[in-house]
């Protein structure tokens, strides 16, 4: 082969890998399905899951997606996780568990290099304490910059829980995870204290750990009459781990209601000094006005 032919071949190869992505690769979609029920899942998320040759999802999310019809029923899936739709489209369903995340990320890269689209399913939003960061870190560690990655957003617990209790996030707010699996409690405490001093409305995730400690820290910087909403399985109705519920209390009494904190599906919304209640005949809502404005200011 002449040097000119070699140059032409190199240019052709480069054209086929613009941005480091070969034309024969699929795409790795990290898909947020929100609470998991169809009313709160975006059209884009549903389309991506239905059209991907490989779907990676936990048993709970598979159950949601099968009930919705996004995935074929388990009875139509063989022992290898393969389901074939009436139109002949073949889809592999892979069960995701916490202990297999690195293994599954690497398997997803292999599938994408084989030309398959992969939907890696996350509850809520994949970038809010979800799977997005792991996928990017694994791609960096495994020199997998050839893998096209698309994040498909979903409704996170802060938004779903806020909607259930009114309008508590209409002013500045922040989220803090109470899980000390990846960061020390000292760092979590520092962030909680800073958020409380700064008068953010605070949404606590992973409340099955340390929620009483978190409440006590915020109490040191915020008055006990600040309103708190304890929200479980927002947007999941009766399909969640413990059933959808919301309960409004105060910061001074929040730790006394551990019976309302049911586990991984629980989030706490801690209001600031402007958060107020709004009541009708059925229930109590929380509202945080933007800058304390009156109706005439809008």
Image: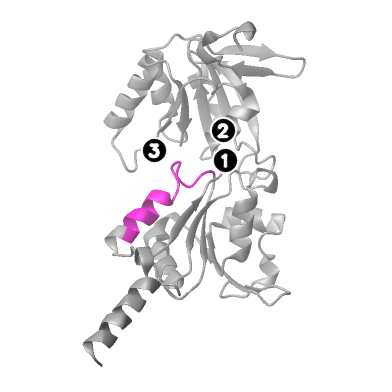
Q: Residues within 10 Å of mark 1 (few under 14, many from 20)?
A: many
Label 1 SS: loop
Residue farthest bottom in this picture:
1
Secondary structure under tag 3 reads loop
Q: Residues within 10 Å of mark 2 (few under 14, many from 20)?
A: some
Going 65% across and 31% down the picture, which residue do you hit?
Answer: 245
Q: Read off the magenta span.
A: 124-139
Whether the residues at callouts 2 and 1 have beta carbons within 8 Å, the answer is yes
* Badge number at residue 42: none
Q: Secondary structure at mark 2?
A: helix
Work out whether residue 113 can be spotted.
yes
Residue carrying label 2: 159
Which tag, 2 or 3, sits closer to the chain's start?
Answer: 2
Residue 262 in view here = no
Which numbered dot is residue 155? 1
Viewed as shown, does residue 220 lie left or right of 281?
A: left
Judge whether 188 appears above or below 155 on screen.
above
Residue lying at the far right in this picture: please name it.
Answer: 281
**Residue at label 3?**
179
Q: Residue sitting at 59 percent across and 75 percent down? A: 79
Density class for disc 3 (Cα within 10 Å; few <14, some 14-19, many ≥20) is some
- Disc 2 from disc 3: Cα separation: 20 Å
Which of these two is toward me, 17 or 75?
Answer: 17
């Amino acid at each position: 082969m002449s040097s000119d032919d070699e140059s032409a071949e190199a240019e052709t190869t480069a054209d086929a890998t613009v941005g480091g992505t070969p034309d024969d690769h699929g795409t790795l979609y990290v898909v947020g399905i929100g609470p998991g029920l169809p009313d709160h899942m975006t059209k884009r998320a549903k389309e991506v899951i239905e059209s991907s040759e490989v779907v990676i999802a936990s048993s709970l999310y598979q159950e949601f997606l099968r009930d919705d019809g996004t995935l074929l029923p388990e009875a139509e899936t063989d022992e290898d996780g393969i389901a074939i739709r009436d139109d002949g489209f073949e889809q592999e369903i892979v069960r995701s568990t916490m202990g297999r995340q690195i293994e599954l990320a690497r398997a997803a890269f292999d599938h994408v290099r084989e030309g398959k689209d992969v939907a890696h399913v996350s509850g809520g939003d994949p970038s809010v304490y979800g799977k997005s960061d792991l996928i990017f870190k694994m791609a960096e560690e495994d020199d997998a910059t050839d893998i096209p990655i698309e994040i498909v957003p979903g409704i996170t617990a802060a938004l779903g829980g806020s909607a259930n209790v009114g309008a508590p996030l209409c002013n500045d707010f922040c989220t803090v995870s109470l899980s000390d699996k990846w960061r020390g409690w000292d760092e979590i405490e520092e962030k909680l204290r800073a958020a409380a001093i700064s008068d953010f409305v605070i949404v606590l995730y992973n409340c099955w750990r340390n929620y009483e400690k978190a409440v006590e820290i915020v109490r040191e910087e915020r008055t006990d009459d600040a309103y708190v909403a304890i929200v479980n399985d927002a947007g999941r109705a009766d399909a969640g781990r413990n059933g959808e519920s919301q309960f409004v209390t105060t910061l001074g009494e929040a730790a006394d209601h551990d019976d309302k904190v049911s586990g991984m599906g629980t989030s706490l919304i801690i209001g600031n000094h402007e958060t107020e209640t709004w009541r009708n005949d059925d229930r109590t809502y929380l509202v945080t006005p933007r800058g304390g404005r009156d109706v005439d200011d809008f």
